[in-house]
Image (cartoon, rainbow, N blue to C red):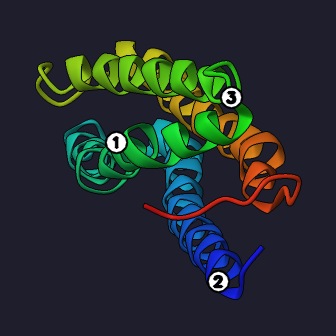
Amino acid sequence: MTATQMMGRDVVRSFTEHEHVEVRQGVDRLAELVAAFPTLPVDQRGLPLQRVLDWFDHTLRPHMAWEESWLFPQIDDRARTRWIACLARDDHQQIVAQADRLRTHLRVSGIPSSMTTTVTLDLAGLEALIRANLEREERYLLPALADEVEPWTPA
């Protein structure tokens, strides 16, 4: 393997790890909201929920799109199978569905007390799905970039 190939692989891995650090910071803020949501006054529940969805739309969704359009195909090519990244793609679909579920709560003015448990569980569900996805990607996908059995070159 050439130094350029090693450097390219290291750059992609470093970039991906940096992205995951940023995603984890957002998930940590989400966890804080999960803990605080039941105690928020009804009239102050919409804004933090909207902020979560804005973070999802402007940070997490573009990150997942990059993974699906560029990173996962690279890993699939190296592994010579689409199955390696298949679970991560499925994770992404579940994460999007959970964010969409949260989005429906914004249609309710003030998010009344009767919905506290439902919204809190939906927020916790989003947090759990994202954390599990990050764990799987870091445990199973990113190591494929370090496999030296066959050279990998960035596009």
Residue count near mark 3 (Cα–Cα under 10 Å), binned few <14, some 14–19, many ≥20: few
Q: Give how far apart the Cα atoms at labels 3 and 2 are.
A: 22 Å
Residue at image mark 3: 80
Q: Nearer the viewer, residue 143 or 42?
A: 143
- Find numbered disc 1 in the image and state the secondary structure of the residue it sits on: helix
The residue type indicated by label 3 comes to: Arg
126 displayed left or right of 152: left
Number of numbered discs: 3
Q: Is 74 rendered above or below residue 32? A: above
Q: Which mark is residue 7?
A: 2
> Given the current orientation, which residue lies at the most extreme right position?
149
Q: Which residue does the image show at 11% across and 20% down from the upper left? A: 107
* Tag of residue 89: none
Answer above or below: position of 5 versus 126.
below
Residue visible at 50% across and 37% down in the picture? 73
Query: Image quarter for residue 74?
Result: top right
Indicate which label's residue lies in the foreground, 2 or 1. Answer: 2
Q: Is 6 situated left or right of 27 in this image?
A: right
Q: Which of pointers 2 and 1 lies earlier in the amino acid sequence?
A: 2
Alpha carbon distance from label 1 to label 3 = 21 Å
Q: Residues within 10 Å of mark 2 (few under 14, many from 20)?
A: few
Q: Position of residue 148 (x, y in %)?
A: 86, 60
Per the image, label 3 sits on a secondary structure element best described as: loop
The earlier-in-sequence mark between 3 and 2 is 2
Q: Is residue 34 left or right of residue 7?
A: left
Identify the residue shown where x is 68% and y is 28%. Answer: 80
| Residue wearing tag 1 | 65
The quadrant the N terminus occupies is bottom right
Q: Amino acid at mark 1?
A: Ala
Q: Secondary structure at mark 2?
A: helix
Quadrant holding the C terminus: bottom left
Q: Quadrant of residue 78?
A: top right
